[in-house]
């Protein structure tokens, strides 16, 4: 996995886990890799993965069973999406609006583009 | 784990460390950064008891390193930039030197050599610099010492070996272990290091937890930028 500097690595790892949940690779009550397994796979410090897991626990995306490891919560997918949406609204959307405004783009035109993006075959 | 207070050191009349203080805790991978000639290798050697402070206090694993007690030396492993190795095979090396480390794990050592594609029955003198270095790194990790010091460990390693190095170190870490890595190749190691230590003008001028910095800045610090900023603001 290639990391970038725009986001903290522990949050990039959280996004990696979230993508597995969204893709249904990991379903509710499925066990997620141990801290060590994921640290080895992603070539990162286990303390960083620990931070990711602490964070995802507070967002109720994963939970811990004592001695057994970490598991996806029942609402893991929703809770993950809620976090990412919050992030998008606070960090990414203002930048997008800035571009839209600077380039004097028309929202109706963007809407048509967006619909074409969702249904590429109908274009 | 490591506590240095007001350490002074120099080679001949040249002053290198002036009132150097350092505090290292177990369970972390420290990246030791500094300009050429800042004294990174000397600091690692001092931790290992290979050079002695002129004055000040050094405590490592509750020992004074300069006494070089066997019970202290068996608890740390120092991977130097250009390791000295006898004319032996990697397997023979473990037979001879493994006994000095009570938790040395031969099976793990052979497994690490295999991961690195180092042939255990080849003699060191017939290996390339990179292969020798990988053998020593394998030994260091398999020795299971609470403290590992590594001087430019990724120097001489090819691209796949750097990736394997990160995997092996990530897998070998535990809350009881401490690894200090001096490096100029910060990009090789920036996902592996969780604490950064900056040695400059004879002192530790900066020491921070990268995960904490990342949380505060809401971005992952770029170590090269961080290094430049800290030094230019000092």
Image: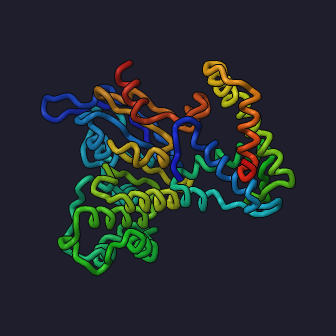
The quarter of the image holding the C terminus of chain B is: top left
Which coloring applies here?
A: rainbow
Which residue is outermost to the front?
Answer: A123
Picture layout, residue B84 above or below residue B197? below
The one nearer the camera, A12 or B212, is: A12
Picture layout, residue B4 above or below residue B111? above
The one nearer the camera, B26 or B227, is: B227
- Position in image of residue B94 (x %, y %): 33, 74
In the image, is B170 to the left or to the right of B90? right
- Position in image of residue B198 (x %, y %): 38, 33
> Does any portion of residue B130 appear in the rendered image?
yes
- Position in image of residue B36 (x %, y %): 24, 36
User: Residue at left 73%, top 43%?
Assistant: A116
The one nearer the camera, A3 or B15, is: A3
- Position in image of residue B7 (x %, y %): 32, 31
In the image, is B48 to the left or to the right of B211? left
For residue B56, which quarter of the picture? Answer: top left
In the image, is A18 to the left or to the right of B73? right
Which residue is outermost to the right?
Answer: A74
> Does any portion of residue B54 appear in the rendered image?
no
User: Residue at left 75%, top 55%?
Assistant: A21
In the image, is B107 to the left or to the right of B43? right
Picture layout, residue B121 above or below residue B231? below
Picture layout, residue A68 above or below residue A79? below
User: Residue at left 29%, top 53%?
Assistant: B155
Which residue is outermost to the bottom?
Answer: B121
């Amino acid at each position: 996995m290639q990391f970038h500097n725009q986001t903290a690595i522990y949050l990039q790892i959280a996004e990696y886990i979230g993508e597995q949940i969204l893709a249904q690779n990991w379903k509710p009550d499925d066990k997620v890799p141990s801290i060590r397994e994921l640290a080895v796979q992603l070539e990162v410090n286990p303390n960083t993965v620990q931070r990711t897991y602490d964070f995802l626990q507070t967002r109720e995306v994963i939970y811990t069973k004592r001695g057994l490891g970490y598991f996806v919560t029942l609402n893991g997918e929703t809770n993950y999406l809620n976090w990412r949406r919050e992030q998008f609204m606070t960090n990414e959307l203002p930048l997008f609006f800035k571009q839209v405004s600077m380039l004097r783009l028309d929202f109706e035109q963007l809407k048509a583009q967006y619909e074409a993006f969702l249904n590429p075959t109908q274009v | 784990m490591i506590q240095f207070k007001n350490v002074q050191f120099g080679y001949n009349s040249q002053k290198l460390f002036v009132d150097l203080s350092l505090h290292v805790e177990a369970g972390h991978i420290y990246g030791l950064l500094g300009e050429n000639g800042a004294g990174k290798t000397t600091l690692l050697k001092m931790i290992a008891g290979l050079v002695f402070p002129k004055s000040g206090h050094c405590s490592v694993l509750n020992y004074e390193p300069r006494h070089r007690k066997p019970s202290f030396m068996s608890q740390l492993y120092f991977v130097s930039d250009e390791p000295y190795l006898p004319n032996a095979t990697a397997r023979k090396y473990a037979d001879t030197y493994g006994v000095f480390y009570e938790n040395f794990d031969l099976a793990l050592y052979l497994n690490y050599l295999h991961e690195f594609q180092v042939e255990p029955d080849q003699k060191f003198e017939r290996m390339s610099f990179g292969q020798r270095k990988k053998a020593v790194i394998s030994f260091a990790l398999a020795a299971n010492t609470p403290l590992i010091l590594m001087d430019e460990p990724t120097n001489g390693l090819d691209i796949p070996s750097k990736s394997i190095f990160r995997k092996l170190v990530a897998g070998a870490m535990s809350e009881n272990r401490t690894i200090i890595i001096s490096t100029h190749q910060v990009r090789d190691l920036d996902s592996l290091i969780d604490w950064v230590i900056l040695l400059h003008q004879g002192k530790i001028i900066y020491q921070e937890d990268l995960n904490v910095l990342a949380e505060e800045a809401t971005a992952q610090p770029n170590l090269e930028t961080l290094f430049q900023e800290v030094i230019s603001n000092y």
